[in-house]
């Protein structure tokens, strides 16, 4: 597959960022050829703004478009499941904005559909593909800090938003865990794997979604992750990885880190910067394109089994905090 032709579902902020990133990658054989919205005028306005040839007035029209190879899904959390199924049944490769779905049941349905149909799908956990996070994996594989014992991380921000915004709207899969906490849970999963025990406490706000979560993840190895996320305080989101013979500090913001500091067993520190190309979203686009050109049906850096495991962890956290979405028991 020489040229990979992309479509976007949605016309919001993330759709606009990805449209700019895709347009900048034309020389790499990456083309943005279609966009879809539930409102045809919105789609056509977006298409004109970004030089896209087709602006569809429904998601179904884009998923049926034979001129589209891959689709980036930039719709609210609550419809990721349905949107991905539509794309996969239209034989499209899929890159879906995090969180992958609102729960593990939905995630498993999507993954089963992708594998049954032999189509590529990946959670758009863009942080995994940034240079600094790739360097974390390399350092840990090389034993730079010995066996990891503890991960400590979190962040807090106070949004100036109303209940109509997806972050605070329960009907759209709102809440701080799925929107921001997923970065922390995903990082812990990348480093330590699936937890064997999960303990969580949180605060549900007046709109019925979690506004603060404290999470303890225990692993069979004896390692633990202590994570927090809040909409009720302010602190830049960062992470520290503590090993038997050193530690690694992943500088804020944890979703887009560009600097690591590594301490050895003697306490000597080495700080290294990892510049990010463009917005940083291009790395995950290349992951999808490289996989399609190589005939792979999933990413080895963000594998589907791990996406499912992360959703299961977040389901357990939400159950303990007391957040239920529509259709959940």
Image: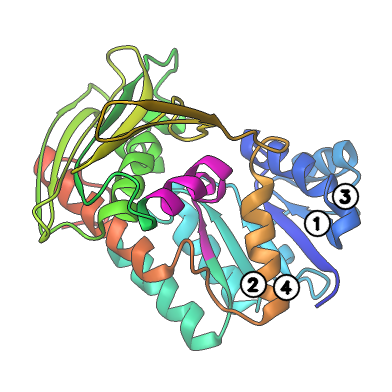
Residue 99 seen in the current view = no
Earlier sequence position, callout 3 versus callout 1: 1
Earlier sequence position, callout 4 versus callout 2: 4
Q: CA distance from mark 4 to mark 2?
A: 22 Å
Please tell me in which quadrant of the rendered image residue 60 appears.
bottom right
List x then y, in percent, for residue 146: 25, 49
Q: CA distance from mark 3 to mark 1?
A: 6 Å
Label 2 neighbour load within 10 Å: few <14, some 14-19, many 20+: some
Looking at the rendering, in which quadrant would you find the C terminus? bottom left
List the residue tagged with mark 3: 52
Magenta residue span? 122-139
Label 1 neighbour load within 10 Å: few <14, some 14-19, many 20+: many
List the residue tagged with mark 1: 34
Tag shown at residue 291: 2
Query: Going 52% across and 68% down the picture, which residue do you hit?
Result: 299
Query: Going 81% across and 65% down the picture, which residue do you hit?
Result: 5
């Amino acid at each position: 597959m020489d040229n990979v032709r992309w479509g976007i579902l949605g016309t919001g902020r993330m759709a606009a960022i990805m449209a700019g990133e895709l347009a900048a990658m034309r020389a790499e054989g990456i083309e943005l050829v279609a966009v879809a919205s539930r409102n045809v005028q919105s789609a056509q306005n977006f298409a004109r703004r970004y030089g896209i040839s087709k602006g569809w007035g429904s998601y179904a029209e884009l998923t049926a478009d034979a001129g589209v190879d891959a689709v980036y899904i930039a719709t609210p959390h609550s419809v990721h499941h349905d949107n991905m199924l539509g794309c996969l049944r239209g034989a499209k490769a899929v890159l879906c904005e995090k969180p992958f779905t609102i729960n593990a049941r939905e995630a498993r349905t999507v993954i089963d559909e992708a594998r049954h149909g032999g189509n590529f799908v990946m959670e758009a956990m863009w942080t995994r593909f940034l240079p600094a996070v790739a360097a974390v994996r390399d350092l840990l594989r090389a034993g730079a800090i010995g066996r990891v014992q503890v991960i400590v991380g979190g962040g807090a921000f106070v949004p100036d938003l109303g209940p109509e915004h997806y972050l605070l709207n329960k009907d759209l899969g709102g809440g701080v865990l799925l929107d921001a906490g997923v970065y922390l849970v995903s990082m812990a999963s990348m480093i330590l794997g699936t937890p064997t025990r999960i303990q969580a406490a949180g605060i549900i706000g007046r709109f019925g979604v979690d506004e603060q979560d404290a999470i303890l993840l225990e692993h069979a190895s004896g390692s633990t992750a202590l994570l927090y996320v809040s909409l009720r305080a302010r602190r830049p989101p960062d992470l520290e990885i503590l090993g038997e013979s050193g530690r690694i500090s992943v500088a804020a913001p944890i979703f887009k880190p560009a600097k690591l500091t590594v301490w050895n067993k003697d306490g000597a520190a080495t700080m290294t910067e990892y510049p990010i190309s463009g917005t940083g979203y291009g790395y995950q686009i290349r992951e999808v394109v490289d996989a399609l050109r190589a005939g792979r049906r999933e990413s080895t850096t963000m594998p589907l089994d791990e996406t499912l495991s992360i959703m299961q962890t977040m389901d357990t956290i939400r159950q303990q905090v007391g957040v239920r979405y529509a259709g959940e028991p």
